[in-house]
Amino acid sequence: MLIFGNFFTFMGFQMLIPIMPPHIQDIGASGVEIGLVTTLFSLGAVFMRPFIGFLLEFRTRKPLVLIGILSLFVITIFYPLTQIVFVFLLIRLFHGLAWGWATTSNGTAAVDNVPPKRLGEGMGYYGLSATIGMVIAPSLGIFLYNHYNFRVTNTVSVILCAIAIILLSISKYRSPDNVKNVKREELKFSFFGSLIDKTSWYQALVTLMATFGYGTVTTFIVIFATARGIHQIYLFYLFNAIVATFSRPLTGRLFDRKGPKTIILICAFLAFAALWVLSFATSNIFIIISGILFGAGYGSLLPTLQAWILSQTKPERRGVANGMYYSAIDLGIGLSGLVFGVVSQFVGISTIFKISSFFFILVMILTIFYRKRHVGKSIKVQRSRRTGA
C-alpha cells in the first residue's frame, strides 16, 4: 500500500511540473518569475526536511504520512484559483514545504517496514513507485494541458492525490522501538543537526554528484530532441522505466549480499555511457539505447544510494537521513539546471551531456575512496549485529 500510495503521490505531483512554466507565463510572469517556479519549490522542500526529520525521531509514522499527503492535496487545489503571479509563487513555495514533508515521511515509513537484511531489495521496490510515476506523469500532464487546459490538468492531479490519501490511510505502519520509547523532552532540535546526518553525509554527497549529472537530462533533453528532429523522445523515458523496473530488484538483492560498492561502480559507468550515447543521438535508436543504459544505470543507482545511506544510520535517525537524501536530489538537479543553463550559452547541448557525464565518474571515484577507508568495517559491524554476533 505504501508503494502504490507513493506512486499516486508522485503521479499527482510530477504531472504538474512540465506545465507550470507555460501556465505562469500565460498569467503574465517574467523570465525571472518563471525560474522561481522551480527555485522556490526546491527551497521549500529542503527547508522543511530538517523539521520533519526531527519529528520522525520521536513520532509514529502514520499521522506524519497523512499530514504530508493531505497538505499536498489541499495546496494543489489552490493553483487554478489565482491569476496573480506573486500568489501563485507563494503557493509554489508552500507546495515545496509539503513535498519535503511528504517524501521524507513516506520514505521513512517504507524503510521501517523493510527487514534490515533485505534493505536494498525493499527500497529498490519502493523506489520504483517514484521512478514509474516520474516517467508516466509528465507525459500525462502535457497531454491534458495541450488538449484541455490547466484547470482540467490540475483537477486530475487532485484526484490522484485523493487516491494516494486512501491508499496511505489503509497502509500498515511500523515504528522502531527507539522511536516509540523516546520522549520529546529528551531531544534537542538543531536545524543543521536535522539537515545533515553525520554518519551518512558522505553518501549524501555522492547522491548530490549523481543527481547533478542527471539534472542536464531533465533540463535539456526535450530541447535537444527538438533541435535534432527527434520526435519520439518519450522512448527515452519508456525504456528507462522498463529497464529500471526489472533491474532494481536484482540490484537490491546484490546490495544485501555484497554491499554498495560494486553496484554503484557499475551503475555510475552505465549512466556515464548513456549520456555519451544521448549526446550523439540523431534517431530513435540512439534514444532507445540511451534510455536502456540510463534505466540500468541511474535507475538503480539512486535506490542503492538511499539504501547505503540508511544502512549507515541509526533507526531513530532514519527520518533525518531520508530528508538529507531527498534534499541532495533536489539540490543536485536544481543546481545542475542553473549551472548548465549558464554553460549552455557557450556550448551546445550535446557537449553539456558529455560534460555532465563526468559527474558519474566522480561518483565512482568517491565511492572507491570511501570504501577503502570506511564502508567495509561499517557493513561488517551491521552484519554482526543482525546475526547477534
Image: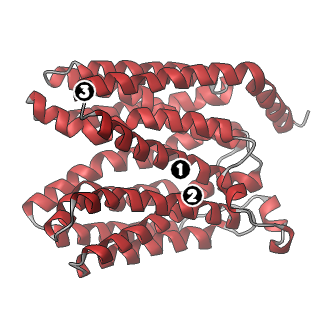
Asked whether disc 1 touches disc 2, contact meaning CB atoms under 8 Å apart, the reply is yes
The residue identified by callout 3 is: 347
- Categorize mark 1 by other alpha carbons within 10 Å: few (<14), some (14-19), many (20+): many
The three-letter amino acid code for the residue at tag 1 is Tyr
**Residue 388 x/y as whole percent:** 89, 37
State which tag comes first along the sequence, 2 or 3: 2
Label 3 crowd bin: few (<14), some (14–19), many (20+), radius 10 Å:
few
- The residue under label 3 is which amino acid type? Val
Q: Residue furthest right?
A: 389
Residue found 8% across the figure and 61% down from its top: 147
Q: Is residue 112 visible?
A: no
Tell whether label 1 touches label 3 (CB within 8 Å).
Answer: no
Location of mark 1 (residue): 326
Left or right, 149 with respect to 209, comes to: left
Disc 1 is placed on an element classified as helix
Relative depth, front residue between 194 and 318:
194
Quadrant of the snapshot with the C terminus: top right
